[in-house]
Image (tube, rainbow, N blue to C red):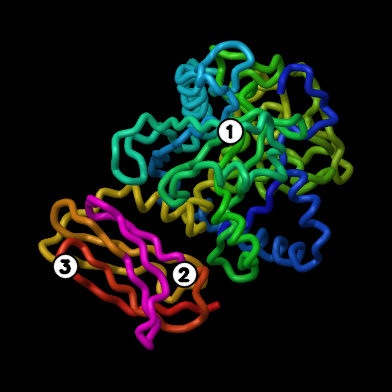
């Protein structure tokens, strides 16, 4: 998978390697036909590179905090009897799901004594953890696992990602959504990239934003998800497809950047001629710019067999941390995890303001209350309204990517209290 780092936005063992392990490369190839997109990508990557240098030099604060990301796993199946688990059953067991969450944490935390540990001097603890959600979007207790029946037997992860997301998804600004499905064989994994951006030069197009509002998460074929309990691929059977796809969700590129000797904007990942399609962990070399080097086949953003993978690098860490800081959607997800202090009276603060895309409202009050968000234009016309039952102090989103440029009034109702603030939308 090679997705553009638009931050600031692999079926069975018999699958042939002519197929894409990850759908990201397909997406990149399509976009590369657009000269405007190519210019924006180049401008964005330059700015990101400069930010990476700044963070390295400053030993930035964003590399010190461990982020814990709530995950919801949506199992999409066509098992009319709703049988859970067993051979060749896309309606996989909770145990298989839990095994995948464990792999994510082993890999992203570089845990000693696990398959995710390495002794490479450029190997990084990404300081990102993943936990199954304990509450649903309405505040009800949850296991972080949903199961949805459909008559459709398989999906094209690349072309049908929005259709999959339309079956079920939870708020993208509060959860990492992972869908487990039966792939039709074209790809075994696909991910959304953090397309929203506050960086000059790579403002996402309207279609990018609209698309990400429909689909923002990771899709994995059930035979490549987790490490146990069901029917697993022979090559991709240790959960690294999900590790790879979540890397894209966090803004990482393939180590080829989807072209021979491409630049993934991470200096500590050697340039390579092609992604690794071997079925064993044999050493591979590349000659790029006249220099022959050994490929880092262990890198999670390559296509190596799962058992070969064990490393994210320090520069990849910096890149993902910047994605979490600079992508509004990722930033809002992290903000939603904060425990906000209660206030005696309702207080609100809209950030960012002014804004080109979505904003969020830092909303504080006492106890738990029903909350409503209402947006009016300056003529008093109702533009947008959304309600949330039984909420604590929290961050609430304003979907102002649908608003025209101008000034608006945001009104927040929490129980019997009301607070208002002017917002400015700049398109």
Q: Earlier in the sequence, mark 1 or mark 3?
A: 1
Does residue 321 belong to the magenta stretch? no
Q: In the rendered image, which quarter is residue 381 located in?
A: bottom left
Q: Is residue 374 magenta?
A: yes
CA distance for labels 1 and 2: 33 Å
Q: Residue 111 appears at what percent x and percent y? A: 47, 24
Q: Which residues are magenta?
A: 373-400
- SS for tag 2? helix
Relative to residue 97, is residue 202 drawn left or right? right
Q: Quadrant of residue 87?
A: top right
Of residue 124 and residue 101, the one placed in the foreground of this image is 101
Seen at 50% across and 17% down, the residue is 84
Q: Which residue: 32% across, 38% down? A: 135
Q: Which residue is mark 3?
A: 417
Identity of the residue drawn at 38% across and 63% down: 360
Question: Which quarter of the figure is the C terminus placed in?
Answer: bottom right
Mark 2 surroundings within 10 Å by alpha-carbon count, few (fewer than 14), some (14 through 19), many (20 or more): many
Disc 1 vs disc 3: Cβ atoms closer than 8 Å?
no
What's the distance in space between the residues labelled 1 and 3, CA to CA?
43 Å
Which image quadrant is residue 268 in?
A: top right
Q: Residue at x 59, y 71 (%)?
A: 200
Q: Position of residue 26 (x, y in %)?
A: 77, 45
Mark 1 neighbour class, 10 Å CA radius: few under 14, some 14 to 19, many 20 or more: few
Which residue is denoted by mark 2 in the rendering?
400
Camera-near label (1 vs 2) is: 1
Q: Is residue 52 in view?
A: no
Image quadrant occupied by the N terminus: top right
Q: Which residue is mark 1?
A: 150
């Amino acid at each position: 998978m090679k997705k553009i780092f638009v931050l600031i936005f692999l079926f069975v063992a018999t699958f042939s390697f002519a197929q894409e392990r990850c759908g990201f490369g397909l997406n990149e190839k399509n976009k590369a036909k657009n000269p405007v997109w190519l210019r924006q990508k180049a401008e964005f990557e330059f700015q990101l590179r400069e930010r990476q240098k700044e963070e390295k030099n400053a030993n930035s604060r964003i590399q010190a905090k461990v982020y814990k990301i709530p995950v919801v796993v949506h199992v999409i199946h066509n098992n009319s009897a709703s049988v859970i688990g067993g051979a060749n059953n896309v309606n996989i067991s909770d145990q298989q799901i839990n095994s995948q969450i464990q792999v994510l944490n082993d890999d992203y935390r570089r845990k000693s004594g696990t398959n995710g540990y390495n002794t490479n001097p450029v190997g990084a603890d990404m300081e990102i953890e993943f936990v199954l959600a304990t509450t649903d979007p309405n505040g009800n207790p949850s296991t972080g696992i949903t199961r949805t029946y459909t008559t459709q037997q398989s999906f094209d992860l690349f072309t049908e990602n929005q259709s999959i997301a339309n079956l079920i998804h939870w708020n993208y600004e509060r959860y990492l959504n992972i869908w487990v499905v039966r792939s039709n064989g074209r790809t075994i994994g696909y991910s959304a990239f953090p397309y929203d951006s506050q960086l000059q030069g790579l403002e996402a197009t309207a279609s990018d934003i609209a698309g990400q509002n429909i689909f923002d998460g990771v899709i994995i074929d059930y035979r490549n998800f987790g490490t146990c309990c069901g029917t697993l691929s022979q090559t991709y059977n240790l959960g690294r497809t999900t590790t790879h796809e979540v890397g894209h969700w966090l803004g990482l590129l393939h180590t080829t950047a989807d072209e021979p000797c491409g630049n993934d904007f991470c200096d500590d990942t050697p340039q390579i001629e092609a992604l690794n399609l071997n079925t064993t962990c044999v050493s591979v070399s590349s000659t790029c710019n006249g220099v022959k080097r050994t490929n880092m086949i262990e890198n999670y953003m390559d296509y190596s067999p799962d058992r070969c993978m064990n490393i994210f690098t320090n520069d990849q860490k910096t890149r993902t941390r910047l994605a979490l800081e600079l992508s509004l959607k990722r930033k809002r997800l992290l903000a939603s995890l904060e425990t906000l202090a209660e206030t005696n009276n309702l207080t609100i603060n809209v950030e960012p303001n002014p804004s080109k895309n979505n904003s969020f409202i830092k909303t504080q009050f006492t106890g738990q209350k029903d909350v409503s968000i209402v947006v009016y234009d300056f003529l008093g016309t109702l533009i947008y309204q959304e309600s949330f039952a039984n909420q604590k102090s929290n961050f609430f989103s304003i979907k102002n990517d649908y608003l025209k440029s101008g000034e608006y009034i945001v009104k927040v109702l929490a129980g019997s209290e009301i607070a208002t603030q002017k917002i400015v939308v700049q398109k």
